[in-house]
C-alpha cells in the first residue's frame, strides 16, 4: 500500500551538515552531504551513541546546526514524547492532544492493519501494554498522509509475533526512516539502508544483509590492500637502507685524497665516484618519498572496518548436571495465575530462550528462579521485585551462582565507578570491556542516567560478563543495543557456551545462540 500525498522522487537534500552538542569539543556530524528519496523505506544503522536519534531530531529541526537541510515534505517522529502526562486519560483523548486534527476512523483502519483491536482506543492509556502503545502511536503516525516518517526503535520490548506483524505492516508502507538493531526486521521491511560507519555515512540500495555482504567485501579488499602496502613499505625501507649504505661506502672512498700520490686518471675517477654518490643519495630520497606515500595510502584504509573485538567471560561449572528443573509449574500473584503447567529442564552448557507474547509469564519464571533460597544472585538489584508464589515442582541446584540482567535500567544512576564498586568487579577490566563494546573514554566521566538506553544495556551486559557464575539469566538484554555489539555477544556465547536462560525477541540472535526455545 503506497500512501497518497508523498511525492515520487521528492528528496531530502542535506549539504554541509555539521553539528556538536553545546559544550562538546567533538562534532557528531561534520560536513555531511546526502540525498534521500522520500519514497524509500530506509533502514538506519549505527553503533550506540553515534548519533542516529540526533540525526532524526536534526531532520525535525529540533537543534541548531550548520549547513542546509532541504525538503518539500513535512516530517513526523516516533515515538511521541508527550504522552506520559495523560496516562490516566482514555487512549483516544491522548491521541487528540497529540494531534487534534487527526481522523479517528483512519487510526482505526491502521490499527486493524496492525492486527490490534480498535477498542483499545477507549481504554485508559496506562492499561495498554508496551506493544499496544507502539501500535497506537504507529497507527496515529501513518493515519496522516503526505508526511515522511522518522521511526526510532519501535521493536524494543516487542515479542517475536508482534515484530512479525510490524514487519508485515511496514512492508506495505513507504516514506520512512526506521532505526532498528534487529537484523530480521531490517531485512524484512526496508529497501535502502543509511549506515553511520566509523568515519563516513553510507547510503545503499538493499537491506541489512545485502549491505553487510557488500561491507565484508570492501573490508576484505582493504585488508588485502593493507597487507600489500605493509609489504611494499618493508621493501622500500630495505631498498632505502641499502642505497644509503652504498652511498656511504662511496663517500668513504673519497676520503684521504692526496694530489702528490694520484695522477689525472684517479682525479677523473674521483669525479665519477662523487657523481655516483650523489645519484645514490637521490635514489634513497626517492625511495623514502615512495615509502611515505605508501604509508599515507595504508592509513586511509580500514577506518570504517567493523571487526568486533572478541569478548570473554568466566562461567563456573557446577558439580550437578541439571541446574534447573520445572515440572507442572504454576506461578500465581494473589488470585491471578500468570503461568500454568510449565515444563523446563536446564542442563550444564545449555541455553534456553523463553519466547511468547508479552505478559505470558516469561519474566515470572525468572523471578521464581531468582527468589529460590538455593541460589546466590550476584547482581545486587535482582531481588527488588516481588516474586510469584510457586506451585508444582521447581528444583534448583543448591549453591547455584546466578548473574542476572534485568529489563529495567531506571535504577542506573550516579557514576560508573560507583556502579562498578557496588557490583564488585574489577574496574579496569569493566572499562576495558566497555571499550570493546565501542564506548568512548569520555563516557566514563558521565553519570549513568545521562547514558543512552543502548549504553545502559551495555553496562549491564559488561557487568554480567565479568561475574563468575554458574548460570546467566538475561531478561531482554539486547533492547537498544546496536547490531555490531549483538554480533560480539553472539560470538561470545557460541565460543564460551555458558549456561543461560534468556528472554530475547531478536529472532536472528535466538537462532544463533539457543540450544532450546520454549514457546510459552
Image (cartoon, grey):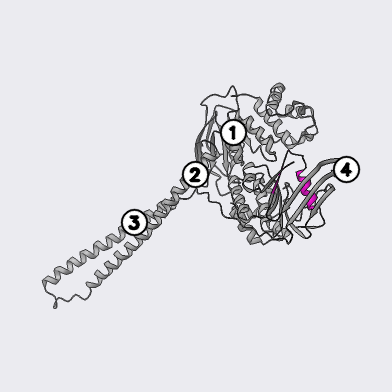
Tell me the distance, in whole angstroms, between the alpha carbons under discs 4 and 2. 54 Å
Q: Position of residue 225 (x, y in %)?
A: 41, 51
Q: Is residue 332 above or below residue 205?
A: below
Q: Are marks 3 and 1 in contact (CB under 8 Å)?
A: no
Query: Which residue, given by chain and number where applicable, does mark 3 sit on?
Result: 289
> Upstream in the sequence, badge 3 or badge 1?
1
> Upstream in the sequence, badge 4 or badge 1?
1
* Residue 469 belongs to the span the image colors magenta: no
Q: Residues within 10 Å of mark 4 (few under 14, many from 20)?
A: few
Q: Residue furthest right?
A: 335
User: Secondary structure under badge 4?
Assistant: loop
Q: Nearer the viewer, mark 4 or mark 3?
A: 4
User: Secondary structure under badge 3?
Assistant: helix
Residue closest to the eye, 302 or 489? 489
Query: Which residue, given by chain and number where applicable, does mark 4 sit on?
Result: 334
Q: Position of residue 427 (x, y in %)?
A: 66, 61
> Upstream in the sequence, badge 2 or badge 1?
1
Q: Is residue 473 visible?
A: yes
- Residue 215: give its label: 2
- Residue 189: give its label: 1
Q: Position of residue 135 (x, y in %)?
A: 70, 32
* Position of the N terminus by quadrant: top right
* Position of the C terminus by quadrant: top right
> Upstream in the sequence, badge 4 or badge 3?
3
Q: Is residue 101 visible?
A: no
Q: Are marks 2 and 3 in contact (CB under 8 Å)?
A: no
- Residue 277: give its label: none
Q: Residues within 10 Å of mark 2 (few under 14, many from 20)?
A: some
Amino acid at each position: 500500500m503506497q500512501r497518497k500525498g508523498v511525492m515520487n522522487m521528492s528528496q531530502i537534500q542535506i549539504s554541509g551538515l555539521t553539528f556538536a552538542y553545546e559544550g562538546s569539543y567533538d562534532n557528531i556530524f561534520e560536513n555531511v552531504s546526502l540525498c534521500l528519496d522520500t519514497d524509500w523505506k530506509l533502514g538506519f544503522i549505527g553503533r550506540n551513541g553515534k548519533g542516529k536519534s540526533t540525526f532524526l531530531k536534526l531532520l525535525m529541526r529540533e537543534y541548531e546546526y550548520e549547513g542546509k537541510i532541504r525538503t518539500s515534505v513535512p516530517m513526523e517522529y516516533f515515538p511521541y514524547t508527550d504522552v506520559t502526562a495523560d496516562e490516566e486519560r482514555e487512549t483516544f483523548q491522548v491521541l487528540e492532544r497529540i494531534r487534534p486534527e487527526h481522523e479517528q476512523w483512519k487510526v482505526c483502519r491502521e490499527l486493524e492493519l496492525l492486527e490490534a483491536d480498535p477498542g483499545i482506543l477507549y481504554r485508559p492509556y496506562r492499561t495498554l501494554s508496551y506493544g499496544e502503545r507502539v501500535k497506537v502511536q504507529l497507527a496515529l503516525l501513518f493515519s496522516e498522509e503526505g508526511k515522511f516518517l522518522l521511526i526510532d526503535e519501535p521493536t524494543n520490548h516487542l515479542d517475536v509475533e508482534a515484530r512479525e506483524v510490524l514487519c508485515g505492516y511496514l512492508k506495505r508502507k513507504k516514506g520512512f526512516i526506521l532505526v532498528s538493531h534487529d537484523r530480521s526486521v531490517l531485512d524484512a521491511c526496508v529497501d535502502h539502508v543509511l549506515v553511520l560507519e566509523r568515519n563516513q555515512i553510507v547510503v545503499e540500495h538493499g537491506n541489512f544483509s545485502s549491505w553487510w555482504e557488500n561491507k565484508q567485501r570492501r573490508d576484505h579488499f582493504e585488508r588485502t590492500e593493507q597487507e600489500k602496502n605493509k609489504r611494499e613499505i618493508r621493501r622500500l625501507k630495505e631498498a632505502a637502507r641499502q642505497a644509503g649504505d652504498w652511498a656511504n661506502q662511496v663517500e668513504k672512498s673519497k676520503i684521504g685524497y692526496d694530489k702528490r700520490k694520484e695522477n689525472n686518471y684517479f682525479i677523473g675517477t674521483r669525479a665519477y665516484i662523487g657523481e655516483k654518490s650523489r645519484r645514490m643519495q637521490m635514489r634513497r630520497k626517492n625511495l623514502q618519498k615512495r615509502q611515505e606515500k605508501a604509508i599515507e595510502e595504508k592509513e586511509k584504509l580500514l577506518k570504517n572496518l567493523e571487526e568486533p573485538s572478541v569478548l570473554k567471560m568466566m562461567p563456573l561449572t557446577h558439580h550437578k548436571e541439571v541446574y534447573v528443573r520445572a515440572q507442572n509449574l504454576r506461578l500465581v500473584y494473589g488470585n491471578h495465575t500468570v503461568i500454568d503447567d510449565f515444563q523446563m529442564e536446564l542442563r550444564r552448557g545449555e541455553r534456553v530462550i523463553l519466547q511468547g507474547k508479552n505478559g505470558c509469564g516469561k519474566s515470572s519464571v525468572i523471578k521464581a528462579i531468582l527468589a529460590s533460597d538455593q541460589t546466590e544472585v550476584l547482581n545486587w538489584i535482582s531481588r527488588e521485585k516481588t516474586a510469584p508464589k510457586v506451585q508444582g515442582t521447581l528444583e534448583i541446584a543448591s549453591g547455584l551462582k546466578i548473574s542476572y540482567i534485568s529489563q529495567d535500567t531506571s535504577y542506573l544512576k550516579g557514576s560508573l565507578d560507583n556502579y562498578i564498586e557496588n557490583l564488585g568487579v574489577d574496574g579496569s577490566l569493566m572499562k576495558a570491556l566497555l571499550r570493546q563494546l565501542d564506548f568512548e573514554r569520555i563516557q566514563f566521566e558521565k553519570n549513568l542516567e545521562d547514558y543512552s538506553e543502548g549504553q545502559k544495556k551495555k553496562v549491564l551486559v559488561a557487568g554480567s560478563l565479568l561475574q563468575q557464575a554458574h548460570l546467566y539469566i538475561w531478561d531482554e538484554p539486547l533492547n537498544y543495543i546496536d547490531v555490531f555489539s549483538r554480533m560480539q555477544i553472539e560470538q561470545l556465547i557460541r565460543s564460551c557456551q555458558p549456561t543461560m536462560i534468556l528472554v530475547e525477541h531478536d529472532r536472528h540472535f535466538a537462532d544463533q545462540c539457543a540450544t532450546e526455545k520454549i514457546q510459552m
